[in-house]
Amino acid sequence: MQRSLNLPTNDDDESDSNYYDEEDSEDDSSSSVEGADPPSPRRTPGRLQKAGLLPLPKKKSKKLKITVPSPILTNDSLKVTNEPPPNNWDSHNKIQTKPKKKKTDEKHPKRWFIPNMNDPYETFIDHGTTVDSQGYPLHPNGDTIFVQRPGICEAKNFGSTAFTKRSQVHKRSKGKWKVITHKCLGVLVCNLPDCQWAGSPPTDPDVLKELFETPVQCQGMAGKCTGEVHHIKCENTALRIDIHLATEWGLLRHRGIHHHVWPECKKPDPLAHERFDEVVENNPKSGAFKLKIGKPSQDDGTTFETVTDIHPAFQNSDRLAYYRKKKLIGLDLVPGKNGSGVGDKFINDMFSWAARGLQVISASFMPGVEHFTFQTKWMRERLLARDGNREHYQGGLLSDVTYRYFENGYLLSTSMFCEQLQRWIPVQLTWIRGLSEEYYQVHFTILLKQFFLPGITAAEREGLCRQVVDFSKAQANGFKAAYKDVGPD
């Protein structure tokens, strides 16, 4: 018996079943089940589609089936953490997200820009502001505004402030504008309510942090206050100064309230400097003490004009003497480090010192040992003085070198502690040209020779020599060489 094959025919009359060419089912038993779904038509083009009589079927895109392996549960994986899980999908597809823009600080929104000089800015001095004699705010407060107009309204102190601050300077608009910003650093105050001391905090943040690692005693009441110092920070204040470099037109703008007292100002402002220079120039022979006391006014003999009224910084005698000497050096009235062209004034000063009691007890111009040693009678008496128990000084003799007084030399001094004055006093001064061992040997030789005077026993002499304290290696070697030269054989 022959087996018949169902082959396709080439008849023109075709049924609708020829819309798609049907494929034989892989499982013949599935087609014999009643009620089963008919086999899906295949997606390959039929004869009518190949002939162009029907459109080609659209191909469905295949969806990728992502299989995620089931995790292996361990004790570490069951731990609860606050960290978000890693986003493996973004790292796999290399999706780069744009960085988010920083939100503007809501506490300090940007309100100030480069000013327009044609805008009608007006000077406004808010409450709590301290101004100088020209009306410029040295301690601005609140919404203070100051406009500098060249030739109309100019202030000598424009650009400066009197409170302690940390400053930044920038150039804007291709170098046409100079922008200065000042940040107030607050004030140092005492924890005692009766103490009115107010000091300036250090500008270095690291130094300020180290300052309060240990309790700091208050410096008020001439150093006798028992309170402790703490720092009051200044928040929510800002100061900006814009200066047009071509025209010198400027604008100062301030915002915020300083909820603290103003610290003591240690440096005079430019306007105070100018007034102080005029006083020194008109009275070059007046010393620091006389400038501080002042002189009777021409209008009223009961009042006095003093430099302390110009600025509180001149109340300190040492600071006053420094600024006075600095002005006189500029006027070529006193020598600076290089002599300032005053000829033999140093030689004349040595004669004047000798007349006042500061005698030159040793001098040499020989190369390698150039020196001038000075000492007064009172210094020598203090060095060899005895206490109530007839014992010599046993508090140590300290030697130090100062660099700031001479351009081509150094001042070597030896000091002792005076019980009567409760301070260190010099007992021998020597100008030396160098810092080698030979110069130290000369200084210590002159010092040790004073211990070999009559009336001083060998034991006392040995005790005085042991009071000499050395610091550097050159000083130690110089002292040893001097002791060998002066000491007993």
Image (cartoon, rainbow, N blue to C red):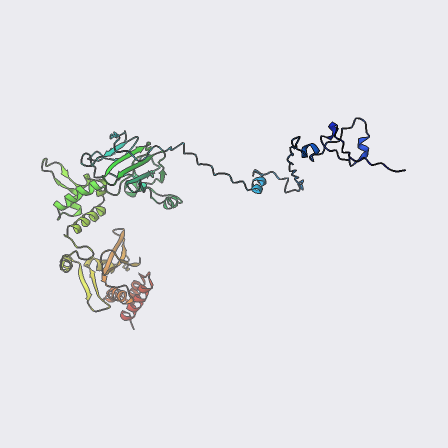
The image quadrant of residue 165 is top left
Q: Name the residue rendered at 25%, 32% in the picture.
A: 118
Residue at the bottom extreme of this rendering:
489
Image quarter hosting the C terminus: bottom left
Image quarter hosting the N terminus: top right
The percent coordinates of residue 346 (x first, y second) are 16, 59
Of the pair 231 and 109, the residue shown nearer to us: 109
Of the pair 12 and 238, the residue shown nearer to us: 12
Compared with 261, 282 (above or below) is below
Q: Is residue 361 left or right of residue 167?
A: left
The percent coordinates of residue 10 (x first, y second) are 76, 33
Of the pair 187 and 10, the residue shown nearer to us: 10
The percent coordinates of residue 47 (x first, y second) are 70, 34
The percent coordinates of residue 195 (x first, y second) are 31, 36
Of the pair 4 and 281, the residue shown nearer to us: 4
The image quadrant of residue 431 is bottom left
Looking at the image, can residue 19 be seen? yes
Q: Is residue 238 left or right of residue 356?
A: right
Looking at the image, can residue 188 be seen? no
Compared with 287, 483 (above or below) is below
**Callout count:** 0
The image quadrant of residue 484 is bottom left
Q: Is residue 201 left or right of residue 76?
A: left
